[in-house]
Every structure is written in C-alpha cells, then in structure tokens.
Amino acid sequence: MSRTATIPWGAFSDKHKAYIKAALHNRMCVAEGAIRSGKTIDHCIIAAAYLETTPDKYHLASGSTIANAKLNIGVCNGFGLENLFRGRCRWGKYKDNEALFISTQTGEKVVIFAGGAKSDSYKRILGNSYGMWIATEINEHYDSADSRTSFIKVANGRQLAAKRPFTLWDMNPCNPGHSIYENYIDRYRDNGLPGGYLYEHFTIADNATISPQRLEEIKGQYVPGTVWYRRDIEGERTLAEGLIYPMYREAIGEPPQGNATQYCVSLDYGTRNAFAALLWEQHAGVWYATREYYYSGRNEGRSKTDSEYGADLDRWLADIPGRLTVIIDPSAASFIALLRRKSGRYRVRPADNAVDDGIRETATALQTGRIKISEALDNWQDEASGYVWDESAGEDRPVKVDDHLMDAMRYFVKTMRIATPKGVYVSPFGV
C-alpha cells in the first residue's frame, strides 16, 4: 500500500475488507451494485497496492469520458490515486493523453486516463501496452463485435504483453440484457478466467460510513419504483419497461400570478422531423413550461427553413422581456448560427445531450415538483403519454417516435442542472 496514505480500515465493512484482501489474488475483479456502496474506493485502494509492486510501467484508467475517469479514479471523493499517492505523483501528458505520473517502490508508473464511450474512443489507447486497466462504469464503454474498434476488446488486447496484467471494473446495475453481462461479466463468472476472477455485488448497506440521514438524502434524489431507483439504490439488474415518465400527470400545474423571475427556452431542432420548443418560467424556485411551439414538416407536407423558424421564434416570444437563453441540441449547427446572429435577443447554450442521465434527472424533476407543465401544452401531454422504453432493445433506449418535446424538456433539465442535488457528498476518508 502507498507509504503516504493512511487507510481508515475501521470505516470498511467486513464485505469490503474481504473483497480488497482477495482482489490481488485474481487476474480480474468486478464490483457491481448500488451507488455510494464503496465500489470505486475499493478499486482505488486495490490499484494503489498493485502499482506499488508491479513491474509494468504503463497502465490505463477509463470512464465514459476522461473527466469521468479523472473524477472517479483520480479523485474519488478524496480517496483516488492522486490522494493515495499524495506527494509522490503529478498530473501531466503522455502522448497527448491526460496521465498521472506516480513514484512507487518499484519505479515510476504512468496511469493514462481515457474516455471509452464513443465509437472512436479506442484510438486514444492505441500504441501502448498496459499492465493494469481500471475502469469505472464499464457498461458505458463502447463495445462491438469488431475487435478493432471495441474499446473493451482493444483495452483487453493491450494487456496481452504485460508482465502482470490486472483488470478492475465497476458499474451500477443496468439492463439484464446488456451485452456487458453476456459477453464478459457473467460469462467469466460461469466459465472462469485464467488467473482468477473475482465478482462481488454491493448495496448501500455495505457502506459502513453512510448515516441513516445521508441514506435518506441519497434516496431523495430518486423516484421510488423507477428503474433508476431499483438499480442505483436497490442495486438490482432490471429491465426498463413501460412509461418513461409515469408521473407526468401529477406534474401538470400552472404558475402563480405575477411576473416570472427568469425565462428560458429549450428546443429540439428538426426539418422533416418536428421542430419543438418549450418556454420555461421560474416562479418561487419552480420552473414551469408555459408554452410550446411544435411544427412537423413531415405532417404538414412542407419543411421550413432556418429563417422561417427564426421568425416564428421571434413572434412566439415577442412579449417575453429581455435577452433569452435558448438551450438547443449542439448538432443543430445552422440554426445555432442563425440565433447567434440575433445577439441582442438570444443567448445560445448548447444542450447537455446525455440521454440516460438526462432522462433519470428529468423523472426526478417531474416527481419532486422542480418542474411543472401547463395543462395547455397538448402536444407535450400527447408525447408524455406515449413515451415508453423500447423493451426489445438490450440497452436502455426510448422508442424514438414523437419524442421531440420530451427531448426539449430533457435538454432543459440536464443543462440547467435542475435535479442536481444541492448537497455535495463529502467522503468520510479525510486524506
């Protein structure tokens, strides 16, 4: 273990201690389970112990994005690699990749950080052999049958030349039909893996540092009974099925009398597909969608130009004072350019288009009353009543039919961080 970090072992449950103790006797370790159950902290501790003794110099740390990898492995609530090796490491660049250079008792180690979610992510990890691969949220890494472009297959292949290969994966449960189970996790569990395979499932109850009050705060960020609650809180592999927003009727409500404190517009751009926009007003800390704009070139038999949509938007918002923030899918480059030319009227903000997290946060915002929808929004209600999960897919995916106002709503919630918890989790491991 690192010479400069003190591990408060009394804060670990027996289950976590047993997992950490057994890890280095295996070629691969997988920790699956609820959020805040301590999976990633375990893996950072295991990784630090491995790095102290391995003869291999180069190693890989990955997440869905580089930022995700650095946050969950480099920092990890104050217990990541940079903390475990405090005073003996520095951030820098290695072949244009973010890297942590660590001084260990067996020489310098280089941990290269990478994002793995995109179809071309594998390109960032070529050209190196890796001893250790530590991955967080492995189910969000890109995988395919093509071993040349699958991030998971490429990363595995890059360990073949290592003197002491070692793999650590963590994840929250997902769709039981996800390929990560069939191709890797359950396959290894059932058939074994040369060098040893260790799998453990954790729940929040396995984290001895979480108080009952903190547990209730974490639960409060989720909607009971939803797929995200069952996965993130109960640690259950479960299928996403039925209505995506079953609480949509309860979210219908009108703003109080008086002027709004803020206005915002979110829109999903389309030419043949529908062009859909929502006007949001903030009253007493609650955001209300009070107007909708909806035009389908396919249904109307004629597509509109960007200039026509821009003129429609001007008329639709003519009575709204001040300069308006417009949240829009960043792929709508031509319309973004048009709005930016109207610099005195619109402030363009590219949307955060994360689908899974955006849907989960939108469900929370609807359930908790952080957003409300006017009863006058007929198109929104039509879409919400038919917005369902694609149960034939092996991954979480909405049925992509008549979902344009749903996308506009998701852009707003995710980009404006409407459902982001106000409190910031502070690790009990003060290092």
Image (cartoon, helix red, strand yellow):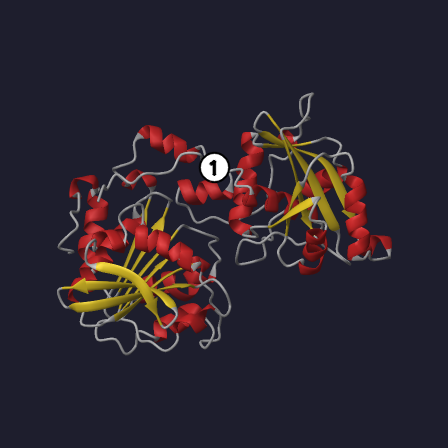
Quadrant position of the C terminus in the picture: top left
At 28% from the left and 46% from the top, the residue drawn is 78
Q: Residue furthest right?
A: 301
Callout 1, which amino acid? Tyr
Residue annotated with mark 1: 222
Left of 57 or right of it: where is 312? Answer: right
Q: Secondary structure at mark 1?
A: loop
Evaluate whether residue 164 shows in this view: yes
Q: Please provide percent x and percent y for residue 335.
A: 71, 56
Evaluate whether residue 403 shows in this view: no
Q: Please provide percent x and percent y for residue 412.
A: 60, 43
Quadrant position of the N terminus in the picture: bottom left
**Image: 248 above or below 180:** above
**Crowding near pointer 1: few (<14 within 10 Å), some, many (20+)?**
many
Q: Residue furthest top?
A: 257
At 27% from the left and 67% from the top, the residue drawn is 110
**Image: 282 above or below 134:** above
Left of 108 or right of it: where is 407? Answer: right
- Foreground pick, 73 / 12: 73
- Foreground pick, 292 / 10: 292
- Tell me where residue 381 sits by quadrant: top right
Q: Residue furthest front?
A: 344
Left of 5 or right of it: where is 387? Answer: right
**Image: 214 above or below 100:** above
At 56% from the left and 28% from the top, the residue drawn is 285
Q: Please provide percent x and percent y for residue 17.
A: 19, 48
